Amino acid sequence: MTLLSFRNSITGEIHVSGSPEGYAGEEWELVAEGADRPDPAAEIVEGAWQVPVAVLQQRQWARVKAIRGERELLASTPFGVVQSDQASKLNINGLVMMAQLQGASFSEEFTLADNTIAGPLSGQQMVQLGMAVGQHVSAVYARARALRDEIEQSSDPASVDIESGWP
């Protein structure tokens, strides 16, 4: 069905209909014809369907958050790549605390993301591993914040390159 879009010249309301019936008279103006709404958020602007920039910005930011979540999951350390999901970060933080409390007597084998073993790690090495994970997560969030700023300032958010520049 071909959609017709009418704007009320008094209220500014836009109605979309498959028929011109009920839209006769001076108060209704045909503003778009023959195009189905291409997107649920699209509005008629100057006779054409357009998705508001704010909606496009929100969608692009949602994509960035998804990438951020993926990038946060693995972190490079001096000892190899480790898992850095929430549960893994809790385990790493616990081991770092143990290393700090035990001092020179700390010794721990650590399973990397590829299931190989690093270590045994000394207390100082365990702290280095924990710091590397924290720095990785911080860098991932910094990249996401920079992208959010770029998206919010853009009139064409889809043109913002959200794939590159991640740690």
Image (cartoon, helix red, strand yellow):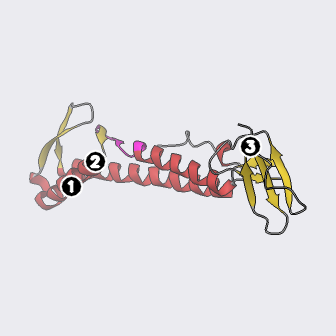
Q: Amino acid at mark 2?
A: Leu
Q: Nearer the viewer, residue 109 or 36?
A: 36
Left or right of 30 on screen, residue 16: left
Q: Are marks 1 and 2 in contact (CB under 8 Å)?
A: yes
Which residue is drawn at the image coordinates 73% and 49% (left, top)? 17
Count neighbours of disc 2 (C-alpha within 10 A) and say few if under 14, some if 14 to 19, many if 20 or more.
many
Q: Which residue is mark 1?
A: 96
Let me know if residue 73 is in the magenta part. yes
Q: Which residue is mark 3?
A: 3
Q: Which residues make up the magenta segment?
A: 70-80
- Distance from the alpha carbon under mark 2 to that under mark 3: 60 Å
Left or right of 54 on screen, residue 105: left
Residue 128 visible, this orientation: no
- Labels in figure, total: 3
Decide which of tag 3 and tag 1 comes sooner along the chain.
3
Count neighbours of disc 3 (C-alpha within 10 A) and say few if under 14, some if 14 to 19, many if 20 or more.
some
- Give the x, y percent position of residue 9: 85, 64
Q: Which residue is mark 2?
A: 129
Q: Helix or strand or loop: what does disc 1 sit on?
A: helix
Left or right of 144 on screen, residue 114: left
Which residue is drawn at the image coordinates 40% and 48% (left, top)? 136
Which residue is drawn at the image coordinates 85% and 51% (left, top)? 30
Q: Amino acid at mark 3?
A: Leu
- Distance from the alpha carbon under mark 3 to that under mark 1: 63 Å
Count neighbours of disc 1 (C-alpha within 10 A) and say few if under 14, some if 14 to 19, many if 20 or more.
many
- Give the x, y percent position of residue 70: 41, 42
Decide which of tag 2 and tag 3 comes sooner along the chain.
3
Report the residue that reaches farthest toward the right. 26
